[in-house]
Each structure stands twice: as structure tokens, then as C-alpha cells.
Amino acid sequence: MTETKYRPRRSCLYMPASNTRALEKAKSLPADTIIFDLEDAVAPDAKEEARANACAALQSGDYGDRELVVRVNAMDTPWFAQDLKQACLSEADAVLVPKILNADDIIQITDFMEDLDANLDTQLWAMIEMPQAILKLAEIAALGPQQRLTTFVMGFNDLAKEMRADHDRTMFGSVMTQTVIAARAYGLNVIDSVYNDFNDPDGLTAECVEAKTRGFDGKSLIHPAQIETANRVFAPSADEIAAAEAIIAAFADPANAGKGVIVVDGKMTELLHLKQAKQLVATAQAIEPLAQ
């Protein structure tokens, strides 16, 4: 399965599905993606209520054009099967599954989704937060074109716990790069992990800038106060848009017809730069109506 239309995912906000006030507030928040969370943010005795709330929210039609995703509980929990079933029946845009270990997990989940006759547009997102998954990134990503898998979401809190390490983001630099490479090799999106201190906008900005520089599409968030920063950092700047439009215009000039390399603003510019320019302009065009 492949997406036919670009969708921005600058800000992917987790909202605890057990909190009806939070779900109501999410209807007016400028996040690109709302993730109704049934996992970490929900106590065991509130799991079924949270699932019902998430399904009601999905079916309400009250969230406009926002992408609506459900983070279900992990495959080895007693809630997983019903979480996945109800999310698919409620036609979530995507189901985010935590604790993915390997390619076999992806195959089992997508087979389950097929058995449920899930809408073909319902995507599978995978949390990358377990050491086993890091070792199998390429094998997992390779299933994307054949399965419903479209997106990796980093989970550094859990990865640090599994590593028995302090949560120091600097040690995840190589993991971030490996994940982006695997994702891009097979056409997947990739979303950065959360920033835990929602009272530290400077720290959040720094993480967003780092993630964008490494090639991430956006950032997962834990608080509405973080949305503006993620939206701003992951949106193309006016200078970037102008430069991209100049590249597109130069290649469209009849004088450059058939050329693979041209000079734009004094720089050697190849067809790969044209592809990047078109992607950047498409991103800007997709974001523009969201800012209205």
C-alpha cells in the first residue's frame, strides 16, 4: 500500500483516550496528527473505556482534516486484539503498534487487519523502541511496499529503559540515522520521539531542529503547548521554498530541456535536487491550508 497524497506530519500529538476533556480539546488543536493513546497514558482498569472513547472520537467527524491515529496496546497484552479490531472497524487513518520486535510482527498484524476487512486506506505505524527492532530495521521497513506499513515512530523512553541506560538523547544519534535510512530506503515516513519537558520550549526547539536536520518528517508530542514549535520547525522556510521554486522553474525552462545537470543561482543542480525541490514545495502546499 502506498499513499497517493502527501500529508504533513510535523506535529503528532498523543492524547490519552481515557480523558474525555483532552479528546474534546483536541478538536480545536492545530496538530497535523492526533494519536488517541490506549497504551502508556491509560491505566489498566481504564483500557476498555479508553477504547470506546477513541472509537467514538473516530466516528464523530469532529476533528476536521486532522489525521487520526490510534496507539493500541502491545501484541503481548490482553487488550491488543480488541484494540486493533475496534480501531480498524472505526476506520482510523492508522493504527500505531508499540513494542514491535521484527518483520514477523508486522506480517501478523497486517494479516489480522486483512481478516478484519480493514479499510485499505488504514495504515500501520510501528513504534521503534525495542533493541530487537533496531537490529531488524531494514527487514521491517522492507515490508512497507507490500504491507500497510507506512510510518516509523521513535520511542526513546522505552528504548532507554530496555537498554538499562539513562535517557540521554545524544546516545541515540546513530539509531536516528539508521532509522531514517531504513525508512527512506523503502518509502516510509519517520517521526521523532517525544520531548518529555513540555515547559522547556528551547529544549524542544533544539530537538526538532536536530530531527529535521537528520531527515525526520515531524515529532511526536505529549502536550498541546509543543504543537506550535513542531509545526514551525518542520515547515519549510520562505527561503527554502523560494530556492525550491527556482530549481523547478529552471528545469522547466525549454533551454534546459533534457539536461540532467544545470546551474541554478551559481550552484550545480541535478535531477535529484529537482525531486527534492518538488517534495519541499508539495510539503509547503499541503501545510498552507492548515495555517488558515
Image: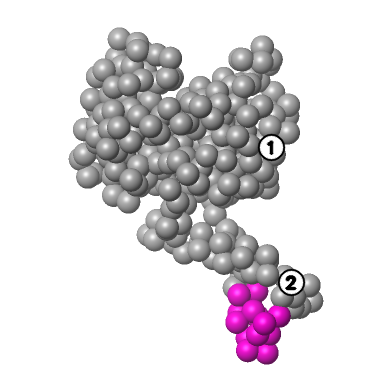
Residue on which the image places disc 2 = 269
What type is the residue that disc 2 sits on?
A: Thr
CA separation, marks 1 and 2? 27 Å
Q: Residue at x 61, y 65 (%)?
A: 275
Q: What is the number of callouts on the image?
A: 2
Nearer to us in this view, 206 or 169: 169
Coloring applied to the structure: one colour
Where does residue 217 sit, x and y in percent of width and height? 55, 47
Q: Above or below — where is 277 with respect to 155?
A: below
| Residue 178 marker | 1
Q: Residue at x 32, y 51 (%)?
A: 65
**252 left or right of 36 in image:** right
Is 255 included in the stretch rendered in magenta? yes
Q: Quadrant of the C terminus?
A: bottom left
Q: Which residues are magenta?
A: 246-259
Is 64 included in the stretch rendered in magenta? no
